[in-house]
Amino acid sequence: MTKTVSALYDTYDAARSAVSALEAAGIPHSDISIVANNSESWHRDDRESNAAAGAGTGAGVGAAVGGVGGLLTGLGMMAIPGVGPVVAAGWLIATAVGAATGAAVGAATGGIIGSLTEAGIPENDANLYAEGVRRGGSLVTARVADERASEVQAILNRNKSVDLNARGRLYRGEGWSRFDPASPAYTADQVAKERARYTAL
């Protein structure tokens, strides 16, 4: 049996470190995913994203990475309603894009939440992850054998992951209840302000 473990990060750098640590621990690239907010345009790619090509085949973003260079070399850009521009790679986004067959590639938000819940992530957590990415965060997810789940969660937690329960309380204290794909995406300034308040806590 496999289990899905995930963690939210306030910065891409922390998420990147988590992905690298998972790879170093022997987790296959095909079992790791990353979805990172790109509202601040920190990632620019002049090449066409392979997300569109993967949507019809289920190949998805980053599927062509194989074993060369690691998951992060397969990052592709796309837009998600309610989140805005993201940079992503791995099985989660491939599943989400595949779930949006017949629709625009960017219309994969419900697919991301659906992909998380179908993989065993509670719906409340899936909504928090999506909202966290909307507000500038990065989500790292891994599919692992049950016996490695605790070890992999510990790896994710060591890399400055967000306390999801505390973050949920903060969001709900401001009137948030669940992720809304119809919400406007955060601007670069809003993302910067959102990150700044977490470093002040």
Image: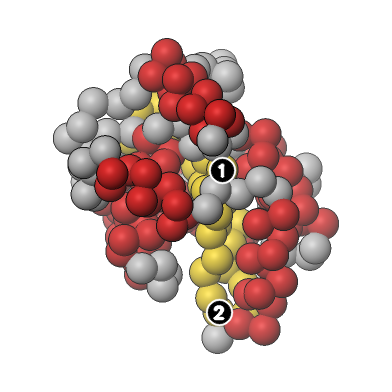
Total residue callouts: 2
Q: Nearer the viewer, residue 167 or 86?
A: 167
Quadrant that contains the C terminus: top right
Residue farthest to the left, as pictured: 182
Q: Nearer the viewer, residue 27 or 171?
A: 171
Give the residue displayed 37% in from the left and 51% down from the top: 168
Give the residue displayed 45% in from the left and 52% down from the top: 166
Amino acid at the residue labelled 2? Thr
Position of 76 relative to 61 (above/below) = above
Amino acid at the residue labelled 1? Tyr
Q: Nearer the viewer, residue 49 or 134?
A: 134
Give the residue displayed 27% in from the left and 34% down from the top: 82
Give the side of residue 114 with respect to residue 194, left or right. left
Horizontal and vertical percent position of residue 37: 47, 31
The 10 Å Cα crowd at callout 1, few under 14, some 14 to 19, many 20 or more, is many
Horizontal and vertical percent position of residue 188: 43, 16
Residue farthest to the top, as pictured: 189
Give the side of residue 48 with respect to residue 152, left or right. left
Quadrant that contains the N terminus: bottom right
Position of 9 relative to 154 (above/below) = above
Q: Which mark is residue 139?
A: none
Quarter of the figure with residue 176 = top left
Give the residue displayed 36% in from the left and 51% down from the top: 169
Q: Is residue 48 visible?
A: no
Q: Which mark is residue 9?
A: 1
Spatial CA distance of label 1 from label 2 is 23 Å
Report which residue position mark 2 lands on.
2
Horizontal and vertical percent position of residue 79: 36, 30
